[in-house]
Amino acid sequence: MVKRIAILGSTGSIGRNALTVVDAHPDRLQVVGLAAGENAELLAAQIAQYEPRVAAMASGGALDRLRRHGASSEVTIGGAGRDGLAAVASHPDVDLVLCASSGTEALEAVLAAIEHGKTIALANKEVLVMAGGIVTEAAARKRVPILPVDSEHNAIHQCLHGRASAEMRRVVLTASGGPFRGRSGPELAEVSAADALKHPTWRMGRKISIDSATLMNKGLEVIEAHWLFGARADQIDVLIHPQSVVHSMVELMDGSVIAQLGVTDMRLPIQYAFSYPDRWHTALPPLDLARAGRLEFEAADTEAFPCLRLAYRALDAERNLPVVLNAANEVAVARFLEGQIAFPAIAHIIESTMDACVPVEVRTLQEVRAVDVWARDFAAEIARRVQLKV
C-alpha cells in the first residue's frame, strides 16, 4: 500500500531529507501536500518534481512569488499561514502528516490533521511543549498515532516497541553537548552566533542549532518525552554523549537498559516514521562501531547551560510555564542570532519571563495562544533592556 504524505516545512532541513526518503521508496510513498515558509523558488521546484495536490506558504507575499514561478497552475493553493498549513494537513487524500516546520505555527495544523484521522510524524518540538495535553488528548480520542521523528524520541519509541508502559523505569535522552561542550559560564559570554551554529555532529536549521548550543533543545525534548511516553520529570535523564552514536536509552524495571544506536542521519528516523510498523531497506551505510571507537557519557552541566534546568522547572510546574519557556526562548534566540544580545542572555531572558509568569491552567488552544503572546511581549521587553546594557 502506498502511503500518501503531507510535509509541513518541506523546504527546511527535515523536509528536504524527507523528500529523499520519498525518492528512495517511490513505490511506497506519494507526496500529496507540501507547505513551506518563505522559500518560494524551492517549493516551486518541489511542486514540479513531486506533483502534490495541495500546497501552502507562510505568507501572502510568498504565495505571490510562488505564483510568479508558475507553480500555482500545477497545484491547488491551500492558503497562507496557519490556515494554509491546516488545509494541507487535513487534505482528504493525506494518510500521514510530517510536521517539520519550526516554531509554533503548525499547532493548529497538527490538531486539524488529528481531527481528520491522519497519522502524525512529529519532528517539531514546540507543538508538544506548548500544547502537549491538548494534542495528546485529541490523538487519544481520535485513536491517531503520534510517531516521533526527533532522533532521541524516535530511539525511545523503538526501544519501547511492544512493551507495556509499566515496564519503563526511566528514559535517558542523549545529547551531543553542542559546540560549547566543556566550556564554563564566563567563557560562554564571548561566543558569537557563528560559533554557536557550528554543531559538531548534526546539520540543522539555525534556531535548533542555537537550542543545541544552549541545551534548550534537550530541555524541550524532556518536556516532549513526558507527553510522548507518559514519563514524569524524575523519570527523564539527560546524558552528554559527544559521539552521537547512542541516540537514546530506556531503563526497564528489572534494571536492563535498551539502547538504539545508528549513524547520524535524519533520514533513518524519518523513514522509520514513514514505514512504521514495518521496516524498509535503506541505502545508508551501516553503523561501524569499530570505527566509532570510544563511546563517552557525562552528566550535563546545568550551571554553564541553565536552559536545561529551566526546562525541568517548567515541566515540574506544568500549567502555562512550558508555553512561557518556549515563547521566551524563541524571542531570545532570535535576538541572539541578530547579534543584539550575548549568549548567556538567552537563559536570563527565559528565566526572567518565567519568574514574572502567573501560573494558570491552559486547557484550550485560545488560552495557549494568549499565554504565548504575553510571554513573547514580555521577553522582547527584557531583551531590549539587556541589549541596552551590552
Image (cartoon, rainbow, N blue to C red):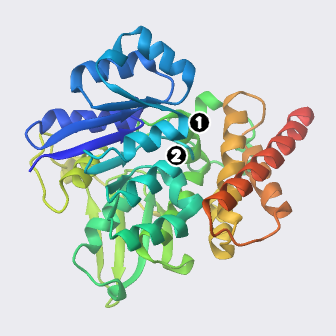
Who's the residue at 48% across and 20% down the image? 63
Mark 2 burial class by Cα count in 10 Å: few <14, some 14-19, many 20+: many
Residue 112 vs 78, above or below: the answer is: below
Name the side, left or right, on which 265 lies relative to 194. Answer: left
Would you name the residue on which mark 2 appears?
178
What x and y, as percent, mark residue 75? 31, 24
Quarter of the image where the C terminus is located: top right
Q: Quadrant of residue 51?
A: top left
Mark 1 burial class by Cα count in 10 Å: few <14, some 14-19, many 20+: many
The answer to which of 275 and 119 lies nearer the viewer is 119
Marked residue nearer the N-terminal end (1 or 2): 2
What x and y, as percent, mark residue 60? 55, 23
Who's the residue at 39% across and 34% down the image? 13
Q: Which mark is residue 261?
A: none
The answer to whether marks 1 and 2 mark residues whose Cβ atoms lie closer than 8 Å is yes
Residue 232 vs 292, above or below: the answer is: below
What x and y, as percent, mark residue 231? 47, 77
Tag 1's secondary structure?
helix
Who's the residue at 34% across and 16% down the image? 71
Name the side, left or right, on which 377 lies relative to 247. Answer: right
Q: How many numbered circles are shown?
A: 2
Residue 185 vs 179, above or below: the answer is: below
Who's the residue at 37% across and 22% down the image? 43
The answer to which of 353 and 110 lies nearer the viewer is 110
Name the side, left or right, on which 384 lies relative to 369. Answer: right
Whether residue 346 is visible to the viewer of this picture, yes or no, is yes
Would you name the residue on which mark 1 appears?
196
Tag 2's secondary structure?
loop
The three-letter code of the residue at mark 1 reads Ala
The three-letter code of the residue at mark 2 reads Gly
What x and y, as percent, mark residue 250? 35, 74
